[in-house]
Image (cartoon, rainbow, N blue to C red):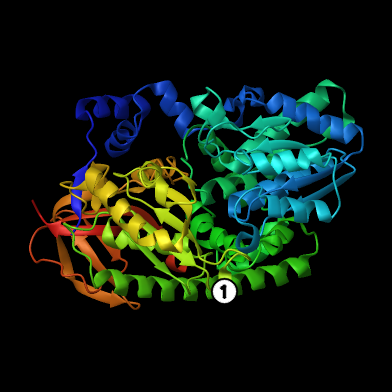
C-alpha cells in the first residue's frame, strides 16, 4: 500500500507566482516544491540556455588537461581514450575520440574494459591489454580513473602520460596523473553532478578554447553542439540529477536529436521501436538498456562501434545484435530476480530484516545491479546481490564474489558498507548504489553485519512506498494550457521527476475496461468535468466504489492523429 505525501508549498505565494509568470496555479506549486521562488531562477529553469553553461576552466585540472591534449595534437602523439563499459562511459569515449580526431590528432584509439575479465575502471589488467595493442604517448580516461593509482603508476613507468577525467567519488588521494579532472575534487557545487560524459564535454570545450586562443584553424571549425546528443544520452542513462548544467545539456541535446538526429541513432531507435518526439523516457528505457546490454553480457566494443561507424549497413547490423543481446539480458535478469525473490520470501520478516544480502554461484555478474534494483522495489530495503565464481568468475579469483547494491532514499548505502568494511575485500559507490568484492568465507558474517547496520538506521521508520503528490487540482484544470506548462518542466529525471497531480472526490464513470494483459481504461468524473484515464499494470488492483482520490500524470494520447489529454494513473484510494 502506498503512503500519499503531498509536497508542501505556500499556496498564497504560488498564486502570486502564477499571476506574475502567467502560469497555471498547479505548475507554480510544482516549481515551489522544486525549490524555485525567484522569477529569474524560474526563467532560467524553464528556458535553459547554452550560454548559461559555466566556464570549463572552473573544473579543477581541466586547463592542464586541455593543454596536454593540445600538446599531443601539435606533436602528433598517439592517444588512447580509455572509457567504461556503461552508457556514460561509452558515449564519453565516442565524444572525445571524435572531437580529438576532428581537432587534428594524428592517431586516436578507443579502449573499453571488459566487465567480466578486467572489472571496473582503469585496472592494471585492462591497462596491460591496452598497452599491448600499441603503446600511446598519452592515455586519457573518461568516466573513470580517479582512484586508479596503481594503473596510473604502471602507465607512467611505461612512458605513457595519463590524463584522468571522471566524476566518481575520490577515496583518499586521487591517482598521480598529469591532470585529474573531476568535479568532486573542486568547490563548484553546480558542477558536482556532471556525468562522465559531461566532464568529457567540458574538456572538449576547454581544448577548443586553448586551441582557438593559439590560432588553431582546425579547432575553430568544430561546433560542440553537434555532440550534445551524446551528452544527453550519457547523462540521462547515468541517472545523475537533471538540474543545473545537466538540465541545460540534456534539454539542448534532446532538442538536437528531435530536430536533426545524427545518423548514429537511427538504427537503434528503429530496433527500440521509438517513434515520435524523443524524451528522457526513451533514453532510459529504449536506447540506454540496449547500449548497456553489450557490456553486461560480453564487452561494450560493439556499442562503441555503433556510435563511431559511418557504415549504415554495419550500424544496422550492430543495432540488431544489441537488441538481441538486450532481450537475452532481460531473460537472465528475470530468472535471477525470480530465484532471488523466492529465496528471500522464504525467510523475510519486516521487523527482522532491514538490509538484504543474497548470493549465488550461477548468477551473471553483468546483471546483478539490475536485479538489486528490482529487489529494492519489492522489499523497500537496501539490497546487495553477489555473484560468486560460476561462469563469470575472473581468472584466478576462485572464491571471490562480486556484488552490486542498491538502496532506498532513507539509507546511505556506501556508509552502511563502510561499517562492514572488515568483511570486504573492497567497496565503493555512493548513497544509492555501490559495488563490492568479498571472499566466500566472509559471506555469513557480512550478511549479519549489513543487516545490523541497516537496522540501526531504519528500525522504526515507515518504509512503505511513498506516492508523491506535487499538486492537487480539479478536473477542469486539466487542459492544454496546463499540459503545455508541464511540458516546459522537461527534461524529467533524477531530482526533477515528472509531476504527479491528484484530484479529490472523483468517481469512475461507466465502468472499467481491461486493455492489454494487465491494464485498465476508465473515465474519471467529478460531476462537472470528466477525463479519460489509463492505469497501467492495475487490472487486478481492487479499486473501491464511491468517491476516489486519483493520483496521475498528464499525457497526450495521439491515437489516429487525434491529440487528446488523458490521465496516466499512478495510484487510487478511497477519498479522504
Q: Please report the residue visible at 87 percent of the width from the left and 40 percent of the height from the top.
A: 105
Q: 350 left or right of 343? A: left
Viewer-closest of 237 and 461: 461
Could you say whether the residue bearing mark 1 is in a helix, strand or loop?
Answer: helix
**In the image, residue 317 lies at what x, y percent?**
72, 72
**In the image, residue 526 lies at what x, y percent?**
15, 55
Judge whether 349 appears above or below 10 on screen.
below
Judge whether 408 appears above or below 360 on screen.
above
Q: Name the residue under label 1.
A: 391
Extreme-front residue of the structure: 441
Q: 502 left or right of 94? A: left
Q: Is residue 387 visible?
A: yes
Viewer-closest of 565 and 29: 29
Q: Is residue 501 visible?
A: no
Which quadrant holds residue 320? Answer: bottom right
Q: Please report the residue visible at 70 percent of the width from the left and 69 percent of the height from the top.
A: 318
**In the image, residue 47 lies at what x, y percent?**
50, 32
Label 1 environment density (alpha carbons within 10 Å; few <14, some 14–19, many ≥20): few
**In the image, residue 165 lies at what x, y percent?**
66, 37
Q: Please report the residue visible at 66 percent of the width from the left and 72 percent of the height from the top.
A: 321
Amino acid at each position: 500500500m502506498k503512503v500519499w505525501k503531498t509536497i508542501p508549498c505556500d499556496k498564497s505565494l504560488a498564486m502570486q507566482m502564477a499571476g506574475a509568470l502567467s502560469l497555471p496555479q498547479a505548475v507554480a506549486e510544482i516549481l515551489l516544491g522544486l525549490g524555485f521562488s525567484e522569477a529569474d531562477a524560474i526563467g532560467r529553469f524553464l528556458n535553459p540556455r547554452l550560454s548559461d553553461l559555466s566556464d570549463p576552466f572552473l573544473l579543477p585540472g581541466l586547463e592542464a588537461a586541455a593543454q596536454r591534449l593540445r600538446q599531443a595534437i601539435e606533436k602528433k602523439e598517439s592517444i588512447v581514450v580509455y572509457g567504461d563499459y556503461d552508457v556514460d562511459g561509452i558515449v564519453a569515449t565516442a565524444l572525445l575520440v571524435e572531437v580529438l580526431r576532428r581537432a587534428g590528432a594524428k592517431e586516436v584509439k578507443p579502449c573499453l574494459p571488459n566487465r567480466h575479465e578486467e572489472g571496473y575502471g582503469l585496472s592494471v589488467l585492462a591497462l596491460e591489454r591496452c598497452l599491448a595493442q600499441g603503446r600511446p604517448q598519452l592515455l586519457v580516461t573518461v568516466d573513470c580513473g580517479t582512484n586508479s593509482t596503481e594503473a596510473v603508476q604502471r602507465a607512467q613507468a611505461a612512458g605513457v602520460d595519463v590524463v584522468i577525467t571522471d566524476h566518481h567519488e575520490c577515496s583518499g588521494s586521487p591517482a598521480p596523473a598529469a591532470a585529474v579532472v573531476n568535479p568532486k575534487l573542486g568547490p563548484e557545487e553546480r558542477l558536482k553532478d556532471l556525468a562522465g560524459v559531461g566532464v568529457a564535454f567540458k574538456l572538449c570545450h576547454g581544448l577548443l578554447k586553448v586551441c582557438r586562443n593559439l590560432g588553431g584553424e582546425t579547432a575553430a571549425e568544430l561546433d560542440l553542439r553537434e555532440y550534445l546528443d551524446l551528452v544527453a544520452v550519457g547523462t540521462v542513462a547515468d541517472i545523475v540529477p537533471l538540474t543545473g548544467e545537466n538540465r541545460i545539456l540534456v534539454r539542448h541535446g534532446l532538442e538536437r536529436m528531435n530536430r536533426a538526429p545524427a545518423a548514429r541513432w537511427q538504427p537503434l531507435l528503429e530496433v527500440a521501436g521509438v517513434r515520435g518526439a524523443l524524451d528522457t523516457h526513451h533514453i532510459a528505457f529504449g536506447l540506454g538498456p540496449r547500449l548497456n546490454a553489450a557490456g553486461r553480457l560480453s564487452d561494450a566494443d560493439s556499442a562503441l562501434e555503433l556510435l563511431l561507424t559511418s557504415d549504415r549497413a554495419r550500424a544496422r547490423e550492430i543495432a540488431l545484435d544489441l537488441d538481441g543481446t538486450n532481450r537475452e539480458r532481460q531473460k537472465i535478469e528475470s530468472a535471477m530476480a525470480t530465484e532471488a525473490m523466492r529465496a528471500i520470501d522464504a525467510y523475510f520478516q519486516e521487523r527482522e530484516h532491514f538490509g538484504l544480502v543474497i548470493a549465488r554461484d550461477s548468477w551473471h555478474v553483468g546483471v546483478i545491479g539490475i536485479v538489486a534494483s528490482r529487489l529494492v522495489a519489492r522489499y523497500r530495503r537496501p539490497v546487495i546481490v553477489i555473484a560468486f565464481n560460476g561462469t563469470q568468475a575472473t581468472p584466478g579469483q576462485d572464491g571471490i564474489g562480486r556484488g552490486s547494491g542498491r538502496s532506498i532514499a532513507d539509507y546511505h548505502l556506501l556508509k552502511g558498507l563502510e561499517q562492514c568494511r572488515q568483511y570486504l575485500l573492497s567497496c565503493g559507490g555512493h548513497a544509492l548504489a555501490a559495488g563490492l568484492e568479498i571472499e566466500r568465507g566472509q559471506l555469513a558474517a557480512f550478511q549479519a553485519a549489513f543487516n545490523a547496520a541497516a537496522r540501526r538506521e531504519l528500525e522504526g521508520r515507515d518504509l512503505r512506498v511513498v506516492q508523491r503528490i506535487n499538486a492537487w487540482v480539479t478536473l477542469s484544470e486539466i487542459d492544454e494550457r496546463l499540459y503545455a506548462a508541464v511540458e516546459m518542466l522537461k527534461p524529467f529525471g533524477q531530482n526533477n521527476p515528472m509531476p504527479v497531480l491528484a484530484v479529490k472526490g472523483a468517481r469512475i464513470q461507466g465502468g472499467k475496461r481491461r486493455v492489454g494483459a494487465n491494464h485498465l481504461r476508465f473515465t474519471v468524473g467529478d460531476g462537472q468535468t470528466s477525463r479519460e484515464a489509463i492505469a497501467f499494470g492495475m487490472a487486478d488492483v481492487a479499486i473501491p466504489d464511491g468517491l476516489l482520490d486519483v493520483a496521475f500524470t498528464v499525457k497526450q494520447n495521439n491515437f489516429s492523429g487525434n491529440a487528446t489529454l488523458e490521465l496516466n494513473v499512478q495510484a487510487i484510494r478511497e477519498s479522504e
